[in-house]
Amino acid sequence: MSTLHAARAGTTGNALTASRLPKGTPWATALAAAILACLIVLPSANGPDDDVPFAALIVVAGLLHLILLTTLSGIVEGRRRAVDRLMTALVTLAFLIAMVPLISVTITTVGAGLARFDAEFFTSSMRNVTGEGGGALHAIVGTVLMTLTAAVVSVPIGLLTAIYLVEYGRGALARGITFIVDVMTGIPSIVAGLFAYALFALLLGPGVRSGFIGAIALSVLMIPVIVRSSEEMLRLVPNELREASYALGVPQWLTVLKVVLPTSIAGITTGIMLSIARVIGETAPLLVTAGFTASMNYNLFDGRMNSLPLFVYRSYMDQGVPFEAYLDRAWAAALTLIIIVMALNLCARLIAKFFAPKTQR
Amino acid sequence: MSKRIEVKNLDVYYSKFKAVEDVTLTIEPRTVTAFIGPSGCGKSTFLRTLNRMHEVIPGAWVDGEVLVDGNNLYAPGVDPVLVRRQIGMVFQRPNPFPTMSIRDNVLAGVTLNNRRISRSDADALVERSLQGANLWKEVKDRLDRPGSSLSGGQQQRLCIARAIAVQPDILLMDEPCSALDPISTLAIEDLIEQLKQEYTIVIVTHNMQQASRISDRTAFFNIAGTGKPGTLIEYDDTDVIFSKPAQQSTEDYISGRFG
């Protein structure tokens, strides 16, 4: 192969050059593959009235693109570059496949949700509303209150557990906690809901429903996520910084508080934000703990409290007349939820950027 | 300010593994003592036992006595935090706190311990410490920049300034120049020469020329083989160690005939 390249390169005089495909080749083969796929798939579709079989088109076009590009590269550039092109194309395809559901969900939700994304939706509850009109203010308030309470409960417990595991924990106890936390990250959310419900049913009697129980259920789901992410971030803090602090005669608790936490605060905050985003869309645990209501409820400790995921679920399951009004409200609530999660993620990014140790030279 | 260190029959263990065996030596105040020896012979481990920093590694413990002006560091009830306030340490790799400015790094020993300090006292302490570490002229106009914005040699001098800002009696240095270029190394060696006026300095180094240039006394550590504990082979005036050492293995090591 090398002699071949050398022979080819002989015309230019540089022994290190090898023949390359032009820069736009992947795009060209992708286009060719798309056209070919249309030619192959479309005639075999059953009739002119059928929908265009997009899935089949995309699969065939993807495969054709892989074959075309690899063959072409193998002929012109040699085996090593052909494998490189094949792998690059595979990675890119995997990325595109991963993006499909994401973009599809976004477009669908925005398209269907905008119909009721109006002022009334954000200023009124569903009390005494049948049919059109009404809004999700009670659900938004419930989601925000319960998630905030869950965060207030979970963040101290989770962060302190992580600090214990990284800075103090040794031996069997620490290993046991790590194992249990790992198990807890995997428990089904309905189990967390039933746990919280059972706990308060024992304390306050059966059939009890309140926003606070929902918040406890959510915090059961949040704590392991916070422990895991904070633990990773605390472990990233170099040991040299702890030693530097000890060598200055600083006790361990002050070292943790003033050296380790400030160094890792950006990552920890991001982890907390993501754990909030993870539980804000939970439906099952709230169904059994906080229940469903059509009315406003600002009191976490008294009575049922609605939430956005449950609002979506009930609007879809118990459609009234006209059913379009219920579906539109469900979509608008789903859009609201997605926007809240997106805002939280943006917040996490900004906080990470703002708090990160400054390293400019 | 400076104090005498007496080490008596000190063994250092990591769990069951004996890392350093039976070291006895006396370090005089206001001197520079260099520890030399091959990698893994326990120099750094032994150095860290002088301010109980080895305890940061889980499972490390010692048997024996370290007396600083007569006080045993390993007597029951001794608080390692108080020990470390008197015996400062500079590490192999410069480790300024990345979240702090140059000024805050120097003041770290004060602020991290939640002690109050007036603005003017703080300014004076920062200037005195940075001048002590020979860094004042280079950074006085950018004290609010992050400590990580300095070059490696400047960062190491910042770490020295941070260590002397808490006014320790003894300064331990664990290969402070091994990550630095020759010019920065020279700056730090000059600095050690000045610091000697006020502090007792113990330095671990792999650089034989450095040991002969800066130290008054030199201790040579060696190890019999992998898995065996490191031992103190010879401890004497630096001139003696480098001109006519008593032990054959010392001569082999300093003349380069040893691995």
Image: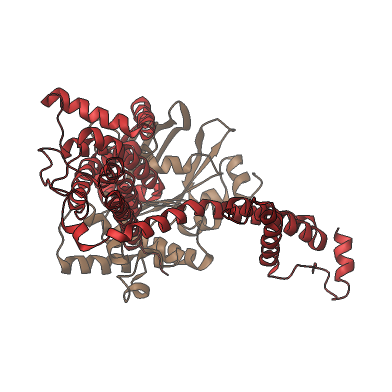
Q: Which chain is brown?
A: B
Instruction: Decide which of A165, A140 is in the foreground and name it.
Output: A140
Q: How is the image coloured?
A: by chain
User: Is A39 situated left or right of A279 in this image?
Assistant: right
Which residue occupies 17% across, 41% down? A293
Q: Quadrant of residue A211?
A: top left
Q: Which chain is red?
A: A
Look at the image and tell me in which quarter the N terminus of chain A lies. Answer: bottom right
A33 versus A312 height, above or below: below
- Tally of marks: 0
Q: x and y percent of residue B23 in the render?
A: 43, 35
Q: x and y percent of residue B88 in the render?
A: 32, 51
User: Is A167 situated left or right of B119 in this image?
Assistant: right
Residue B97, visible in the rendered structure: no
Q: x and y percent of residue B183 in the render?
A: 50, 68
User: Is A138 situated left or right of A94 in this image?
Assistant: left
Which residue occupies 44% across, 31% down? B14
User: Is B20 situated left or right of B132 in this image?
Assistant: right
Residue B228, visible in the rendered structure: yes
Q: x and y percent of residue A313 in the render?
A: 30, 42
Look at the image and tell me in which quarter the C terminus of chain A lies. Answer: bottom left
B22 versus A265 height, above or below: above
Q: Quadrant of residue B146?
A: bottom left
Instruction: Decide which of A192, B144 is in the foreground and name it.
Output: A192
Which residue occupies 75% across, 67% down? A21
A279 versus A178 height, above or below: below
